[in-house]
Image (cartoon, rainbow, N blue to C red):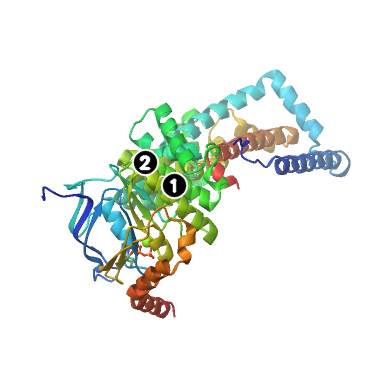
């Protein structure tokens, strides 16, 4: 008996892609027309063509790269370490309930406190520059990953765990072959929240202390009403966020194919 | 230990209680003693809550009994994963593993080399009639097919004893009958010792050499019925009066308990 690959959902995906494309093209046109003919005050708005011209010019002078490097390096370091430590810590508190009783109130308190209130403390402690940025991004990104990893482990189906034990799995094998695979989609969901919070962290960190960075660029151009430059910064953040979010969504479909349908 | 012990699986005075919700311990099983010979097919029937799943979990060593002993080939087993495989009531396949990966699961845990594990898994997938579906994910299969994967996964570790907890309960009537015939064929081919729990009295009679009827909670053995129906059996025998006599005898054995637990459950819901 010959059976072909499992059925996919290609036509649905194509149709979704088409609607997204139509939506983007529509907004681009409306934005450009608004900027050119309706809101002609360039202190509050800018047509898309001006924004991209500005980005092109900044790329030419090297200014754009300087900002990207300053924010990007802090984001990568802060985000990656938050993910690694968040997963480890999340698994730990889920497996050691006693530890979680000790930690949970503090985790919740830190998670709930707006970063904008804490950021100045980090800048004072760690100085202006990459360290305070990393710390702020880390804290923003760490909690959603931790919370979701713990949630994933705690909600793992008891039947699956028992099935694994019945085949003679050790505690470590139960963890590796059941708890972690089951938690992966939860962890990825946490990583997506962490992208949004981490990028917000970049901007917040750079209000209080920075000499360069995309957030820095946004704040300075806002003060000087340089709308094309301000929107350039916003677009970079939005673009980064979209790329990371959709990459993570794709990753989720790979590690958790059963959730897609 | 009895030196001329012939039984593959021996339960001696197994009792179990769970710590109840109200502090009062909940006695679920009482004094279960049973000898099962090598290659024998024994089914267990009993009302809901009579402790059938608990009994299988004890035999598999997933939980220790509160008292009593379980002996396999005359020896006490310390932990799960040896000569026993469990086919669970709910289909509990790993949704992130393909059919082949699920079938190799037990072998992976035991450190069998990947190519050997896959070869063995393929053999048992073939036996349960699933060759060609190796690359499917569980969510792409029907309930009957998932239970076949469950069975293949249990067989792939080549256990002596199979514990099956209402494995066909979620299937429609036609698929269930088909699976019963398939199971008898596989049993004949592999010579396993099978302990099979079911709610379905005709299923219990159709499959078994012996049917064990449990009383309502705390479950104790009400009676053990020898089923004297020649093998190989086919679905036609379910219509004979001989077969029907067994079913009604079983029904009379557990009727009062089932009615009582039904009343208790409906009262609890009200
Ligand atoms: N882990 C547990 N902790 C406490 N009580 C339990 C536990 N597992 C089962 N019980 C209780 O023990 C009794 C027997 O449960 P068990 O699952 O063995 O019954 P069963 O005969 O398999 O029932 P069913 O036919 O509905 O599957 C039930 O009253 C149940 O509520
Ligand atoms: Mg049960």
Q: Is mark 1 within 8 Å of ligand 2?
A: no
Say which chain tag 1 marks. Answer: B
Nearest the eye: B213 or B261: B213
Q: Identify residue for label 2.
A: A175
Nearest the eye: B51 or A28: B51
Residue A47 in picture, x, y percent from top left: 81, 36
Nearest the eye: A133 or B62: B62
Say which chain tag 2 marks. Answer: A
Q: Is mark 2 within 8 Å of ligand 1?
A: no
Q: Tell me the quadrant of ligand 2.
A: bottom left
Left or right of B206, for residue A11: right
Q: Quadrant of residue B27?
A: bottom left
- Is disc 2 placed on a helix, strand or loop? helix
Residue at x-position 36% and y-position 76%? B255
Left or right of B158, for residue A240: right
Residue B254 in picture, x, y percent from top left: 34, 73
Crowding around mark 2 (Cα neighbors within 10 Å: few <14, some 14 to 19, many 20+) is some
Vertical order, A166 against B266 (above or below) = above
Left or right of B206, for residue A185: right
Nearest the eye: B220 or A201: B220
Q: Is residue B256 visible?
A: yes
Residue B5 in picture, x, y percent from top left: 15, 50
Tell me the tag on residue B150: 1
Q: Is residue A110 visible?
A: no
Residue B23 in picture, x, y percent from top left: 25, 70
Residue at x-position 57% and y-position 28%? A72
């Amino acid at each position: 008996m010959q059976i072909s690959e499992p059925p996919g959902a290609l036509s649905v995906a194509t149709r979704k892609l088409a609607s997204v494309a139509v939506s983007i093209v529509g907004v681009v046109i409306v934005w450009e027309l608004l900027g050119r003919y309706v809101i002609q005050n360039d202190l509050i708005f800018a047509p898309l063509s001006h924004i991209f011209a500005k980005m092109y010019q900044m790329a030419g002078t090297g200014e754009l790269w300087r900002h990207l490097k300053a924010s990007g390096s802090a984001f990568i370091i802060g985000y990656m370490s938050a993910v690694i430590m968040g997963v480890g810590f999340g698994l730990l508190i889920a497996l050691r309930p006693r530890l979680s009783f000790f930690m949970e109130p503090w985790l919740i308190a830190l998670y709930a406190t707006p970063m904008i209130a804490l950021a100045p403390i980090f800048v004072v402690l760690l100085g202006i520059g990459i360290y305070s940025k990393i710390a702020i991004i880390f804290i923003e990104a760490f909690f959603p990953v931790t919370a979701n990893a713990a949630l994933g482990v705690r909600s793992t189906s008891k039947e699956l765990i028992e099935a694994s034990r019945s085949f003679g799995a050790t505690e470590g094998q139960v963890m590796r072959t059941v708890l972690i695979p089951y938690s992966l989609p939860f962890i990825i969901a946490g990583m997506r929240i962490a992208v949004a919070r981490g990028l917000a962290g970049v901007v917040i960190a750079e209000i209080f202390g920075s000499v360069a960075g995309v957030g820095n660029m946004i704040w300075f151009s806002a003060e000087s009403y340089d709308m094309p430059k301000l929107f350039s910064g916003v677009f970079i953040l939005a673009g980064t966020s979209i790329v990371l979010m959709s990459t993570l969504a794709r990753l989720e479909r790979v590690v958790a194919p059963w959730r897609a349908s | 230990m009895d030196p001329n012990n012939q039984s593959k699986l021996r339960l001696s005075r197994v009792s179990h209680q769970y710590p109840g919700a109200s502090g009062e311990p909940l006695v679920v099983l009482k004094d279960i003693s049973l000898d099962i010979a090598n290659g024998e097919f024994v089914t267990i029937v009993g009302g809901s809550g009579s402790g059938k799943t608990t009994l299988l979990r004890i035999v598999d060593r997933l939980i220790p009994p509160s008292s009593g002993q379980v002996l396999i080939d005359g020896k006490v087993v310390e932990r799960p994963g040896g000569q026993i495989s469990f086919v669970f009531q709910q289909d509990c396949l790993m949704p992130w593993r393909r059919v082949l990966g699920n079938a190799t699961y037990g072998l992976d845990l035991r450190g069998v080399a990947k190519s050997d594990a896959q070869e063995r898994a393929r053999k048992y997938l073939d036996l349960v009639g699933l060759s060609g579906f190796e690359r499917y994910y569980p969510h792409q299969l029907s309930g009957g097919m998932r239970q076949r994967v469950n069975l293949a996964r249990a067989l792939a570790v080549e256990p002596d004893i199979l514990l099956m907890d209402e494995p066909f309960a979620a299937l429609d009537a036609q698929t269930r009958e088909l699976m019963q015939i398939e199971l008898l064929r596989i049993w004949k081919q592999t010579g396993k010792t099978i302990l099979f729990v079911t709610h379905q009295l005709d299923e219990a009679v159709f499959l078994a050499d012996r049917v064990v009827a449990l009383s309502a909670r705390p479950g104790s053995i009400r009676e053990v019925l020898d089923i004297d129906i020649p093998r190989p059996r086919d679905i036609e025998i379910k219509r004979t009066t001989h077969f029907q006599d067994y079913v009604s005898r079983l029904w009379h054995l557990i009727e009062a308990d089932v009615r009582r637990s039904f009343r208790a459950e409906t009262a609890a819901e009200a």
